[in-house]
């Protein structure tokens, strides 16, 4: 029997995920606790625990961490016949592939190997061959089509494919043979593509290594330090990754790709208190950016292959990721906002944007002095806000954020239904696997696109739900203290919308909202809120401008509005 999750109430297991229910009859069941049910009943999450909140959030959004029995049975059958002896596979076992991911990742979609050549570089990028195992008509594909993606949460994930596949047979784990779809790309000395071939192969990854681990090795290497990796067969590959990564980032800048100083908010369950989430802000290191460039390169090259194939055959039902450029009205609004910020802070060149300068060049030209850090942060946010959201589409189109005319998602075949479907269509076009009937495939593509776009929205709602939990626990701890002892928290004013003022709190990695009405009640005066500032009618009350440093503390909890009321503390009281 496949496991599922249920809530205990009055000695019964009340199903969370629409499973068939039966009376447990177990006197020890804890009220409101969540149990994992398979051949026995195991306590999974007590009421009030962070994991309970994770599972409850999954329930609210209709996300099931468990898979139907039929999927488990199909996965077991595939593990008995993994297709590794397929004579059509190219044998790349001798190539020193490695996977580079977060240290705790277990679903390894991608492995890489790079080498220097006389002309430039050769990039081998191996992607898990999920489309070989998960085929239309199977229970596995049907379930993946319903889910759309793997949903990640603090402490656990709801995988698109059963863990026996996503963490086992299909995952490019070290020291085992695996099927892969390999991008074999030749680059010149500037990082431009000379040729691309894509084929199925059999590989054996040499190691599972982390971004931080590779970064530490590279940093030590630059200092002349020795390391155990120095003599391993993948050492030269990692060194060449730096060369290719830098080349590709330089080419991206030439395409006006705006490189925001993206920081990653990582949520986890506090190991010292399982009732709480923990959030930490981490900057992406260079290795993550290099690895990202190689992944983007494959997705861009894959899109070009699909576009060329579409011209040769009407049977190809490709899926593209499209990101439309901002319309002229948004660019004009951005210029007005940046001008207003410059006026408010008495800034001149290079802070003023003329509407013609490439935004990538504009951002790069801004001063990097520490005193301007908050202004740069706020300006970057204004630029991000003009962009449309990307979406999956049957029609090819530009990907504005990447500065290319075609992009497809090849790189996440175990975590996105769009990835599995894209691999399938490419292999059908190559004649490697039998194609579906065209009308059947057209309908399937429509379903894939609809589910993939919906899943992106669900993932955002899921993350927002966890962020709200973190904000609540973060601020409720403050409420337990007397007002004058509550922490004063530094923040950057990021923007205004209506009567809401958005502030990025230092160290929290999330925005908080300050309401003009709360300011007016606290300071007993009117506040006039525009797009870039909030000005009080009483000059003794504090004002706010986009890019300012502000100080906040928790004032109270509003039961009626179900939210915290934040107080703005004058800067003079630092």
Image (spheres, rainbow, N blue to C red):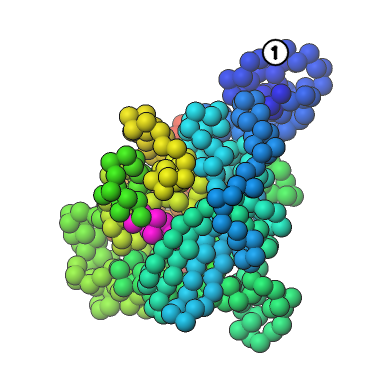
441 vs 170, left or right, is: left
Residue at 38% from the left image edge and 58% from the top image edge? 300
**Above/below status of 186 relative to 220:** above
**Residue at far bottom of view:** 224
**Above/below status of 156 relative to 436:** below
Residue at 51% from the left image edge and 42% from the top image edge? 131
| Count of numbered tags | 1
- Is 312 colored magenta in this rendering? no
Q: Nearer the viewer, residue 534 or 74?
A: 74
Residue at 71% from the left image edge and 78% from the top image edge? 231
**Above/below status of 51 relative to 413:** above
Q: Position of residue 361 (x, y in %)?
A: 30, 74
Span colored in magenta: 294-304
Magenta stretch secondary structure, dominant: helix
Q: Nearer the viewer, residue 484 or 559?
A: 559
- Which image quarter is the N terminus in? top right
- The residue beneath circle 1 is 22
Q: Position of residue 20 (x, y in %)?
A: 63, 15
């Amino acid at each position: 029997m496949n496991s599922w999750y249920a809530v205990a109430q009055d000695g019964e297991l009340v199903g969370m995920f629409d499973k068939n229910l039966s009376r447990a009859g177990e006197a020890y069941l804890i009220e409101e606790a969540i149990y994992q049910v398979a051949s026995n009943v195991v306590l999974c999450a007590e009421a009030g625990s962070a994991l309970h909140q994770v599972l409850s959030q999954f329930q609210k959004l209709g996300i099931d961490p468990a898979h139907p029995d039929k999927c488990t049975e199909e996965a077991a059958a595939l593990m008995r016949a993994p297709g590794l002896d397929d004579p059509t596979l190219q044998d790349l076992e001798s190539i020193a592939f490695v996977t580079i991911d977060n240290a705790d990742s277990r679903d390894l979609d991608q492995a890489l190997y790079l080498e220097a050549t006389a002309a430039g570089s050769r990039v081998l990028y191996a992607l898990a061959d999920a489309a070989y195992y998960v085929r239309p008509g199977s229970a596995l594909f049907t379930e993946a089509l319903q889910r759309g993606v793997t949903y990640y949460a603090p402490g656990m994930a709801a995988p698109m494919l059963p863990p026996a596949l996503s963490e086992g047979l299909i995952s490019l784990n070290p020291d085992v043979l695996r099927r892969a779809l390999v991008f074999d790309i030749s680059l010149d000395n500037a990082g431009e593509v000379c040729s691309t071939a894509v084929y199925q192969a059999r590989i054996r990854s040499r190691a599972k290594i982390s971004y931080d681990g590779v970064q530490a090795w590279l940093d030590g290497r630059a200092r002349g330090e020795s390391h155990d990796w120095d003599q391993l067969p993948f050492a030269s590959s990692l060194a060449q990754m730096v060369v290719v990564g830098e080349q590709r980032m330089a080419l991206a800048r030439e395409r006006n790709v705006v490189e925001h100083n993206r920081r990653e908010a990582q949520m986890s369950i506090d190991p010292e208190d399982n009732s709480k989430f923990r959030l930490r802000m981490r900057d992406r290191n260079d290795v993550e950016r290099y690895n990202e460039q190689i992944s983007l390169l494959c997705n861009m090259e894959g899109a070009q292959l699909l576009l060329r194939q579409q011209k040769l055959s009407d049977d190809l039902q490709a899926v593209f990721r499209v990101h439309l450029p901002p319309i002229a009205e948004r660019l004009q609004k951005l210029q007005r906002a940046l001008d207003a910020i410059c006026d408010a802070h008495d800034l001149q060149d290079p802070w003023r944007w003329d509407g013609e300068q490439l935004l990538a060049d504009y951002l790069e030209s801004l001063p990097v002095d520490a005193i301007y850090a908050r202004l740069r942060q706020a300006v970057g946010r204004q630029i991000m806000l003009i962009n449309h959201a990307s979406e999956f589409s049957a029609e090819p189109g530009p990907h504005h954020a990447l500065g290319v005319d075609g992009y497809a998602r090849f790189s996440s075949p175990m975590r996105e239904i769009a990835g599995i479907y894209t691999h399938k269509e490419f292999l059908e076009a190559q004649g490697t696997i039998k194609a579906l009937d065209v009308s059947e495939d057209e309908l399937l593509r429509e379903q894939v696109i609809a589910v993939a776009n919906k899943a992106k929205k669900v993932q955002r709602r899921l993350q927002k739900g966890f962020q709200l939990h973190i904000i609540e626990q973060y601020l409720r701890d403050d409420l337990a203290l007397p007002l004058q002892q509550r922490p004063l928290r530094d923040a950057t004013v990021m923007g205004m919308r209506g009567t809401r003022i958005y502030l990025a709190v230092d160290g929290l990695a999330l925005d908080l909202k300050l309401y003009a009405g709360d300011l007016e009640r606290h300071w007993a005066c009117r506040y006039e809120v525009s797009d870039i500032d909030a000005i009080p009618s009483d000059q003794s009350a504090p004002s706010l401008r986009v890019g300012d440093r502000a100080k906040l503390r928790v004032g109270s909890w509003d039961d009626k509005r179900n939210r915290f009321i934040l107080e703005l503390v004058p800067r003079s009281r630092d």
